[in-house]
Every structure is written in structure tokens, then in C-alpha cells.
Amino acid sequence: DAKTTQPPSMDCAEGRAANLPCNHSTISGNEYVYWYRQIHSQGPQYIIHGLKNNETNEMASLIITEDRKSSTLILPHATLRDTAVYYCIVRVATYTGTASKLTFGTGTRLQVTL
Amino acid sequence: GAVVSQHPSRVICKSGTSVKIECRSLDFQATTMFWYRQFPKQSLMLMATSNEGSKATYEQGVEKDKFLINHASLTLSTLTVTSAHPEDSSFYICSASRRGTAYEQYFGPGTRLTVT
């Protein structure tokens, strides 16, 4: 799986948009970009994933550059409960057969403040 | 849907004893389960991958005789830490995967193991 690079930490004011960048310059054509987050002392939580088109769900939006070498996770209106470590992971998606593993990097520690 | 539970959430044991941690998929059949370990202020490290009915595949550096994994059914996997030592104290997290979805892995809440 391709390696990702994320800033170690970011701050965001509550109510503002949080934009978390991720570089994945060695991503392969069949690899998806996944985002998970981990709130302190809990298991990771899936947020969103995408291949090359921008994606949006009830939690966040994912913007992937045209060359797919980087992406941005956007939390449109951050709240204090969004304080967590956010992990950007690239891997091949498997719709059949057995699941492939997730390799977690160090992630970005997002601190949402009042 | 796609809820994964772990039991116990916290356990304290004495050095030299064994501890079993359960991971259950509550509302789906998990064809594959993963076990991770996380030390304080560090990221998750994959320990092993287990497919129902077959032996687990361990990551490099993980002792298979020390960390016994059993995936006997499509809803239950267990991790047994044998002859635990203080350095095994960590946060153990399981995840479960079901067939047919790309984001696949659903994580449990984790088990905090402290070995005294």
C-alpha cells in the first residue's frame, strides 16, 4: 500500500471548517483513499473513502486532486467532539474475497477549540 | 449496523498469567477479523489477520505462540495473551470485515490491558 504524509497536528475553531491535508504521491491506480479517525481511547471510526471523484457524506467531504497525489478531508462545521487523530490511508479496495489490511500512519491530531 | 464489541474493556493481570480478549461482530458476519495493538501516543500496529475457520496470519515480529488468535465462528474472534509481561501492557483493538463493502473494517472499542 502507498505511504501517506500528514501534518502531525492542526487546530480549528469550533464552527469553522477543518481542512486536513494528505499527500500520497505514490498512490497506484487501483488504490482508494480512506479516512478514519480515532477519538482518545476509542477504536477508529470510518469517515469516508474515494478513488478519484470528490465524495461527500453526512460526516465529511473528501477532495482528491486530479493527479490523485493528494487529498483533503473537510469537516464543514467542526465541533469539540471532532477532536481526534485523523488517519489518511491508501489501499486497494476489495469488494469480494477477503479484506485487505489497513496500515495506519501517525495521522493528524486535530484540536477543535472554542 | 456493523457494530463490533470487545470484552473486557479493561483488564489488569499479574505477570505470567494469560488473558483472553473477545471480539464480536454483533449484527453482521465477519469473514475477516484483524487485531491491532496501540502503545501510548503511538499509532495502531497490525498484529494479525484471521479468516474464519483458518489459521491467523501474523505480522512480522509478532510472536504467534504468545498471542494466540482463534476465529472459530463468523461472529467471534479471540486473542489470548499468554504468559503476559508488563511490556505487553497496551490498548488492543479488533476490527471486523464483511464481504461486499469497500470500507469494510469496523472497529471495536478496544481493550486496555495492564500487566503488573
Image (spheres, coloured by chain):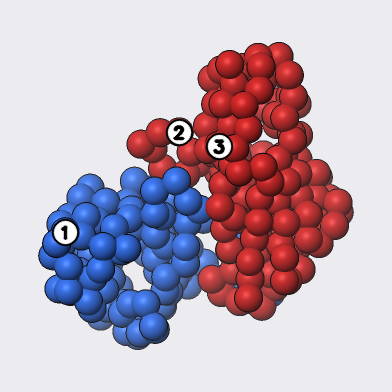
Chain colours: A blue, B red
Instruction: Tell me residue A86's x, y (percent).
Output: 33, 58
The residue under the point 54% across, 71% down is B103
Asked whether disc 3 touches disc 2, contact meaning CB atoms under 8 Å apart, the reply is: no
Residue A108 appears anywhere in the view: no
From the viewer's perspective, is B13 left or right of A82? right
Query: How many numbered discs sit on the rendered protein?
Result: 3
Q: Label 1 belongs to which residue? A: A113
The residue under the point 23% across, 78% down is A76
* C-alpha separation, residue under disc 3 versus residue under disc 1: 28 Å
Residue B10 appears anywhere in the view: yes
Q: Label 2 belongs to which residue? A: B39
Upstream in the sequence, badge 3 or badge 2?
A: 2
Q: Nearer the viewer, mark 1 or mark 2?
A: 1
The kind of residue on which mark 2 rests is Phe
The kind of residue on which mark 3 rests is Arg
Asked whether disc 1 touches disc 2, contact meaning CB atoms under 8 Å apart, the reply is: no
Disc 2 on helix, strand or loop? loop
Image quadrant where one finds the C terminus of chain A: bottom left
Structural crowding at the residue carrying mark 1, measured as other residues with C-alpha within 10 Å and reported as few (<14), some (14–19) or many (≥20): few
Asked whether disc 3 touches disc 1, contact meaning CB atoms under 8 Å apart, the reply is: no
Numbered disc 2: what chain? B
| Residue B112 numbered mark, or none | 3
